[in-house]
Image: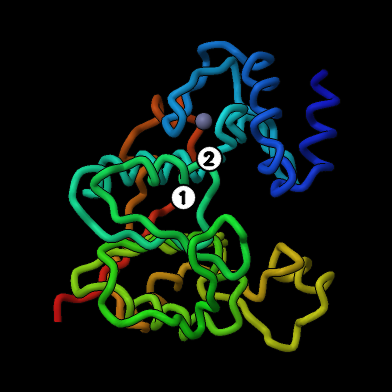
Amino acid sequence: MKKLIRFLIRTIPRPVLIRFSYLFSRIMRVWYRGDKVDCPVCENSFRKFLPYGIVIRENALCPACLSLERHRLLWLFLKEETDLFSNKMTFLHVAPEQCFHPRFKKLENLDYITADLESPMADMHFDLHDIPLEDNQYDFLMCNHVMEHVEDDHQVMKEILRILKPGGKAILQVPLDNSLEETYEDPNITNPAEREKHFLQKDHVRLYGNDYPQRLEKAGFKVSAFSFAQVLGKEKTEKFKLPFDEVIFLASKPEV
Ligand SMILES: [Zn+2]
């Protein structure tokens, strides 16, 4: 069974897993029932999480809601460090994560809307380089693991800043290689296999380094950095299986 699960997760692309997530999670949550790990997103407990990744990581994917380590960390951060679950606010969620989307939709304090380039699940469809929305619309915006795919990330960051209200906040997480001081990009690398070799994935156009917060600042954001798993401590990191070294950047639009 273990080999079969590994084979399925390795072979089936995550969007397909997500499409069949109802059936998949019905089977997996029984198979994985237990009390060794907790998922803070769906609030279920299991004997362990599922293995996941191109290079397989043990204890990564929640059998019930399909959250990964980074989703669980971000969820805990949003609950403890933001007003997203209590204050009335307008919230634009770009490229909405499957594990978060239904939960944000249910929150009555939020005026919640989703956007994507093409996903039929999203409410609006547009290109982030030229967002067809007026200035100063949103209190909160989330757009994770998107910047590494866009042609001109500076332009996209400026567009996101423009539609945020003054004082509005954004979470724009990216895969980040902390052994790189500077972001690595080369517009001449366009072949998918070469992109995978240089930027980790066929559809990535750059690999971010430790200068990522400075790139956000260059677009006009104020940035606060949180090593949030380290704030939560080893015990919770183990229980929720969180990425201990991941830094969450909270980007704010200055109040003028
Ligand atoms: Zn879960």
Circle 2: residue type: Glu
Instruction: Determine whether 23 is above or below 106 in the image.
Output: above
Coordinates of residue 4 in the picture (x, y in percent): 85, 26
Instruction: Determine whether 210 is above or below 64 in the image.
Output: below
Quadrant of the rendering where the N terminus is positioned? top right
| Disc assigned to residue 160 | none
Name the side, left or right, on which 67 lies relative to 89: right
Coordinates of residue 218 in the picture (x, y in percent): 36, 83
Question: Could you tell me which residue is drawn at 41 percent across and 54 percent down?
Answer: 247
In the rendered image, which residue does mark 1 sit on? 246
- Between 143 and 51, the residue placed more toward the observer is 143
Coordinates of residue 18 in the picture (x, y in percent): 66, 42
Q: Quadrant of the rendered structure where residue 136 is?
A: bottom left
Circle 1: residue type: Glu
Judged by depth in the image, the label closer to the viewer, 1 or 2, is 2
Name the side, left or right, on which 177 lies relative to 91: right
| Disc assigned to residue 69 | 2
Marks 1 & 2, CB-CB < 8 Å contact: yes
Q: Quadrant of the rendered structure where residue 76 is?
A: top left
